[in-house]
Amino acid sequence: MIRILHISDFHLNSKTLKDWKQFVKGTLTEKTAIFGNEKSIDLILYTGDLIDIGGKDLGDAAKGFALFRDEVI
């Protein structure tokens, strides 16, 4: 059996980035570690809208995707 962690429709912008850092990242990291200790996670999928409105709030799409890569992944 394959274990998959699926995260969808992140919609990264300056507000969600702040929320990610303050409220979500630590909890998700902790829970993922707990699940991974029980049995390894084979695949992590990020699907849907990774950035919001083509990265408009972050400068442009390239900057938005780079920020997603650096801060989220």
Image: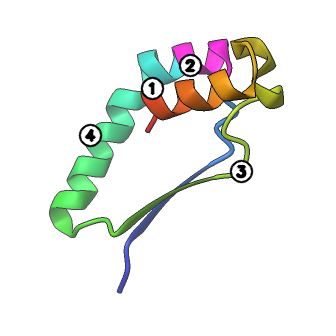
- Label 1 to label 2: alpha-carbon separation: 8 Å
Sooner in the amino-acid sequence: mark 3 or mark 2: 2
* x and y percentages locating residue 12 in the rendered image: 65, 27
Quarter residue 14 falls in: top right
- Label 4 to label 1: alpha-carbon separation: 16 Å
What number is the disc on residue 48?
3
Q: Which residue is mark 4?
A: 30
Badge 4 crowding class, 10 Å Cα cut-off, few under 14, some 14 to 19, many 20 or more, is few
- Label 1 to label 3: alpha-carbon separation: 17 Å
> Marks 1 and 2: CB-CB under 8 Å?
yes
Q: Which residue is mark 1?
A: 71
Q: How is the image coloured?
A: rainbow
What number is the disc on residue 17?
2
Relative to residue 21, is residue 46 depicted above or below?
below
* x and y percentages locating residue 30 in the rendered image: 26, 40
Sooner in the amino-acid sequence: mark 1 or mark 3: 3
Quarter residue 55 falls in: top right
Identify the residue at horizontal 37%, vertical 80% (top origin). Answer: 2
Sooner in the amino-acid sequence: mark 3 or mark 4: 4
Q: Amino acid at mark 1?
A: Glu
- Indicate which label's residue lies in the foreground, 3 or 4: 3
Q: Quadrant of the C terminus?
A: top left
Sooner in the amino-acid sequence: mark 4 or mark 1: 4
Q: Looking at the picture, tell me which residue is in the foreground, 66 or 23.
A: 66
Numbered range of the magenta stretch: 13-18
Identify the residue at horizontal 37%, vertical 73% (top origin). Answer: 3
- Label 2 to label 4: alpha-carbon separation: 18 Å
Q: Secondary structure at mark 2?
A: helix
